[in-house]
Image: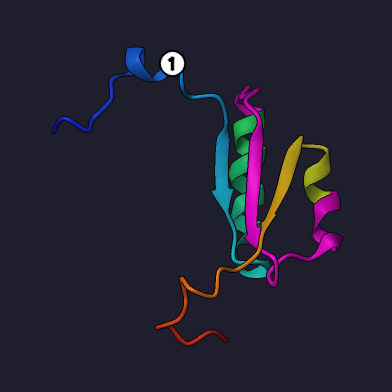
Amino acid sequence: MNNIFHFDEMKNIANGVVITSDGFNSLTSAYLCIHLLRLLGCKLPIELWFWDHEHDVKYEKFFKTLGVKFCIEKKPKKFFKNFPVI
């Protein structure tokens, strides 16, 4: 139970929202989540993370008005060496 943080301890380190996406399949959910955060008044910076092979530039326009930063990460081969990659 020592790894549970209280709000008073978190308020100085919580400075943004990070959402991961697997590309098209979860973009609708990510968009709705981010849109609701903004409607509720959340002004924190938001990052949407993708693996490089899942990212498609054409979807960025939908998130631009919500102030979302797209972060693309190269897939580490070592991490997936024991998993089939499709």
Q: Magenta stretch: residue 52 in it?
A: yes
Give residue 46's quadrant in the image.
top right
Residue plotted at (61% across, 24% down): 42
Image vertical order of residue 57 relative to residue 69, above or below: below
Q: Quadrant of the C terminus?
A: bottom right
Tag 1 residue = 11
Q: Which residues are magenta?
A: 39-61
Which one is in front, 16 or 40?
Answer: 16
Residue at the far left in the pictured view: 1
Image vertical order of residue 60 relative to residue 84, above or below: above
Which one is in front, 5 or 43?
Answer: 5
Give residue 45's quadrant in the image.
top right
Label 1 CA crowd tier, 10 Å (few <14, some 14–19, many 20+): few
Residue plotted at (57% across, 30% down): 16
Q: Position of residue 79 (x, y in %)?
A: 46, 71
Secondary structure category for the residue under label 1: loop
Q: Magenta stretch: residue 35 in it?
A: no
Give the side of residue 21 with respect to residue 68, left or right: left
Q: Position of residue 84 (x, y in %)?
A: 47, 87
- Amino acid residing under circle 1: Lys
Give the side of residue 38 with respect to residue 76, left or right: right
Which one is in front, 34 or 17?
Answer: 17
